[in-house]
Amino acid sequence: YLIASTTAINVNMPGGSLGRLCLGGSGRYVNAVQNSGASGTYVTFVNPMNIPQPTGFVSAAPGETWLFQYWHRDSVGGVAVSNFSNAARVMFQP
């Protein structure tokens, strides 16, 4: 899942996941689940007028900074786990 928030946090191994969660109070793009395939990459397009949050969808205002991070399945020693990507900071321009 791609997750989005305006709040930065720092939580190591949240809920038994590996990695570090960098976003607080985040919404997730539930309809954008993808498989990275052999390349290990994928792309998700963000509509700044429709960003998911826990209370519903919101619009990014000009000048606002949003944080985005992927929460993904992973495998460590053949055991299924979840992990997080690095976070990206995006400032929306007018």
Image (cartoon, rainbow, N blue to C red):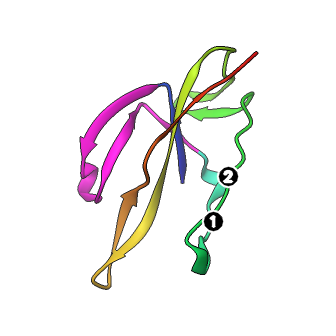
Is 23 a magenta residue?
yes
Residue type, numbered disc 1: Gln
Q: Residues within 10 Å of mark 1 (few under 14, many from 20)?
A: few
Give the amino acid type for the residue marked by disc 2 in the picture: Thr
Which mark is in front, 1 or 2? 2
Q: Verify whether residue 24 appears in magenta.
A: yes
Numbered disc total: 2
Q: Is residue 25 left or right of residue 39?
A: left
- Please say if the residues under marks 1 and 2 sit with CB atoms less than 8 Å apart: yes
Please identify the quadrant where the N terminus is shown: bottom right
| Label 2 crowd bin: few (<14), some (14–19), many (20+), radius 10 Å | few
Q: Residue at x 29, y 58 (%)?
A: 17
- Magenta highlight range: 7-28
Rendered residue at 69%/14% (across/down): 62
On screen, residue 37 above or below 53: below
Q: Earlier in the sequence, mark 1 or mark 2?
A: 1
Image quarter of residue 79? bottom left
Disc number at residue 34? 1
* Quarter of the image with the C terminus in it: top right
